[in-house]
Amino acid sequence: MSKYEIHQTNHLRSNSSTKNDSSESNNEFEESIDDSNTPTTNDNNNIVMKTPQSLDDLLDADDNQNEENTEDNENDDDDDDDSTRLSIDDHNTSETTRRKKSTRKNGPGVLDVPSPDVGLDVKFGFNDLCPVCGDKVSGFHYGLLTCESCKGFFKRTVQNKKNYQCIDKQQCQIDKTQRKRCAFCRFKKCLQVGMKLEAVRENRVRGGRNKFGPLYRRSRALRQQIMRQHFVSMVKAQQNIMPNGNGIDNVHTPLDITGVSNGNGMQVKSEPEQPNLHPFQHMYSSLQNPTNVGHSSHVHHQNHHPHHPSSAHHPHHYQSSHQQQKSSSTSASSSTSFNVYPDFFNTNTNITNNSRMPPFQLNPFNNYYKTPSTTYGHSPPSLLLQPTSSSLPSGVSSTNTSTNNSNPTSGSSNSSSSPVGQISSKLLDYQISSPTTTVTGTNGNNSTSNTSSILSTLTMQQQAIAPNDPMNTDNHTGTSSIYFYNNQYLAPSYDMNDSNNIPEILTKLIESDQAYRCTEVRYIEDIQQIHVDLARDDGDILVVCSLLDKLCFLMVDWARQSLYFKDIQIDNQIKLLKAAWIEILIIDLIWKQCQQPKETCLNCIVSANGQLLNINLIQNPAVKKLAERYLQCVNDFRQLQWQYPEYLALKYLVLFDPDVQGVTESSLIEEVQEKITNALGEYTTDHNNSSSTSNPTKTSPNQQQQQMPTNEQEKFACILLKLPDVRLVGNDLKKLLQLIDRKHDGKLLDGCLLGEMLNGLQSNS
DNA sequence: CTAGCCTTGACC
DNA sequence: GGTCAAGGCTAG
């Protein structure tokens, strides 16, 4: 079994193991997020009409310059799309017929060839495994590549409104041999990996195609690209071994990938029996709110009432969505969802009992945004570094902080106790509180504080610092950007002289990122002043949320200045960000932690503020499990010897998801995604250094199944296949934040960017 | 009930 | 007319 194959299998195991690790939370999470999404969003929509606005504002600054560049791209994309589709379809046309013939007898085969293909699969690692049970994939079914049996099982379950129960702890391992043992866990896993309820037709109409066609097509195209990279890697690896090329008789050249002999006289199908699913399309697109595409009634109900009373009272009782509907009217979703964290904040009556707090204090962020003399009023005095506060545009910040409900300096219509005003004032406060006195000075943007838009302020600051002059930052902050890089925040000190053999696109990404990091330094200083005290009864959740909120801000700031992204229409930018923000955030954190010596943070999460957070101090078991899962991700990436260009590419791949609902420039986005995918594949081929350290030196049983690449072609796949784990962590984090927010009647994150992202994701992801 | 195989039909 | 992802059928 190839590493690639192992990895995918392990991904499945990983899902299962993480389920074991956090089975309760996982399951509960799963229900609670759906549960919380809709009502919370509804609530917020009712209460906070402005929610998208601040994000809009953040992005609108570049609107003017981005409005005119889509048409050509769209045309180009269409061409690309067609060509991609052509190659695929051409290939499929010949292959499918043969496949149908062979699979009838041999079962659904990824490579459509009988036993000899096992060796081929092992060799290339391109075997597709059902994300539910690990059996061989027979095609796209209900949204993703699954095996025939899981397809049928899913169909029967949904059509017949099955009501399963788990006799164990809802943690049953689902694999090919045990998938019959627990229908409850099997169906749960079907949903987890992303099988779409709405793809099961209520009217049982046969034939035809569904609305997922384009998604499937893109998936295939991306999978083909992955395979192409594998072949390129394989060829290069072989050439390294046998420079004369004689050693690659059985290795397909990149040009052969749509139909080549494997050397055994067998036709190797590049697609759809391609490498593992592209993470973005199915495995990785799992656990999303089905609302995106949900049309059938049961989907609708699933979305709105996943947390039905029966599930709360009978944890082993799984109801079909239809049945959930029946019971949903009596569901107290809010209360039941909190059962996930029965002891969360229990001791903090000041927080949980909102009635004791004056209105503006219901939003604890006020404490952090509004305290005079510092942006973070709650921070321990020792951490209240003076440069920040002293560098605040005096008068601006002090005025801001002198009141809890207005931002006079903004001159904004938002300045009031309204949610919009809170957002603006908070972000502006954050913005201005950054040590950027030189920025405001150089740009003459005293007007900054007078502008009505947070974004315009941000834009002013962006313009103040020449983005391509890294040293500018030093002048402004008195702190070398290298200081931060060497302190391993996000961007390492990357020697562009090492850019030999780096794909041009990645070089551009690096340049873009490094330029941004220089402007980012001042914000990082701000963030580094935050101190989290996990020993607090509430886990210092307010500070954590404040930190995350600022990271959201940074992420938006980064994205809107990033290569390619700024060429996208603003409304699409918003959609992409809302869909990807949590994963980008997680990736950033993982990257940061990967830059630290492993020994220094074995059981610690390296927070964005540089603080080491010992997860053993986390009181809540579910949260602790989430932290452990996160650390597992960190460990996996660390073993991959994840490199800076790879990290950047991954962020871009997450961000540029053409399947985000409502995005209108999907072709352009897809083109970027493809470019980055190709570049990443090329880079991992040329710059792999993980093989020497890839021997699993696992320390825990759960990790034993995790596999790391032994060669470059597999590193590429392993990196991509880590995305599902990133998403799982991100989803759980979102659920946690939503639960906490709801625990505070939605006022904890009300009016801040984090809350906006959190509650706005429903319509986009 | 499972899962492999067959039929259907919108889409290309 | 081919594709392929739906639903249907049925032996085990």
Image: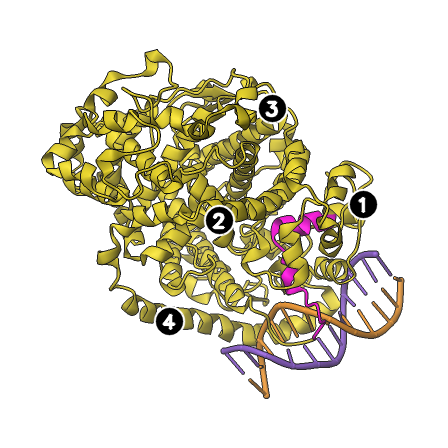
Chain colours: A yellow, B purple, C orange
Q: Chain of mark 1?
A: A
* Helix, strand or loop status at disc 4: helix
Q: Does the CB distance between marks 4 and 2 fall below 8 Å?
A: no
Q: Does the CB distance between marks 1 and 4 fall below 8 Å?
A: no
> Mark 1 vs mark 4: which is more N-terminal?
4
Q: Nearer the viewer, residue A497 or A572?
A: A572
Q: Does the CB distance between marks 2 and 3 fall below 8 Å?
A: no
List the residue tagged with mark 3: A620
Q: Nearer the viewer, residue A589 or A328?
A: A328
Q: Which residues are magenta?
A: A186-205
**Tally of numbered discs:** 4
Q: Which disc, if any, is residue A45?
A: 2
Residue occupying the point 60% across, 56% down: A128
Residue A155 location, x and y as percent?
Answer: 73, 62
- Residue type highlighted by circle 3: Asn
List the residue tagged with mark 1: A165
**Mark-to-mark CA distance, 2 and 3:** 30 Å
Question: Nearer the observer, disc 1 or disc 2?
Answer: 2
Residues beneath discs 1 and 2 located on the same chain: yes
List the residue tagged with mark 4: A78
Tell me the crowding category of disc 4: few under 14, some 14 to 19, or many 20 or more residues within 10 angstroms, Cα based: some
